[in-house]
Image: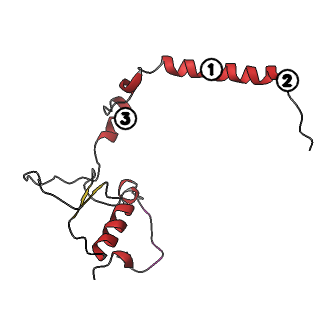
Amino acid sequence: MPRTSRPQSYYDDIKTKFKEERDKRLTYRPPGTAQYTSELTGELEKYSTDPWRKEAPDREPINDQVEVLFIGGGFSALLTSGRLHERGIENIRIVERGSDVGGTWYWNRYPGGRLRASTTCMTWRCLAPP
């Protein structure tokens, strides 16, 4: 199909429309970093807590030195920490916001989900203890 040429006014109209829509968006939010908040209120308030969390035991804060610190306990942190442990690095800490590790698999639960295998435990060979 041959390519047709469009007049410059066509592109100017698109740019004008984008600018108008951008200006609309900017009028409804605070400037700078004030637009970002961790306060969830109203309908979104239910998302501010971890629904799977059990009561955490009282303990003193951990104040130590580690060789490797992972912020977030998702699959990448689990896999990488396992590989580092295989290479002799043993002073590893994973800090997770949720009450357990797993990343996406922790936060996204699938009620009624089934496994097509008779096993009740899934393991990854790369994470198995030596």
Q: Quadrant of the C terminus?
A: bottom left
Among the 4 quarters of the image, the one containing residue 95: bottom left
Q: Amino acid at mark 1?
A: Lys
Q: Is residue 115 above or below residue 23?
A: below
x, y percent for residue 106: 35, 57
SS for callout 3: helix
Three-letter amino acid code at the position of disc 3? Leu
Q: Which is nearer the eye, 8 or 103? A: 8
Q: Pointer 1: what residue?
A: 19
Mark nearer the N terminus (2 vs 3): 2
Let me know if residue 111 appears in the view. yes
Mark nearer the N terminus (1 vs 3): 1
Marks 2,3: beta carbons within 8 A = no
Tell me which numbered mark, 2 or 1, is placed earlier along the sequence: 2
**Coloring scheme of the render?**
secondary structure
User: What is the C-alpha distance between the residues marked 1 and 3?
Assistant: 30 Å
Q: Which residue is mark 2?
A: 7
Along the horizontal axis of the image, is 127 left or right of 2? left
Q: Secondary structure at mark 2?
A: loop
**Magenta region's main secondary structure?**
loop
Identify residue for label 3.
44
Q: Position of residue 126 (x, y in %)?
A: 37, 76
Q: Amino acid at mark 2?
A: Pro
Q: Find residue 96 and report its horizontal and vertical position in percent.
A: 27, 54
- Disc 1, SS: helix
Residue 123 in sight here = no
Q: Which residues are magenta?
A: 112-117
Q: Looking at the image, which residue sits at the far right?
A: 2
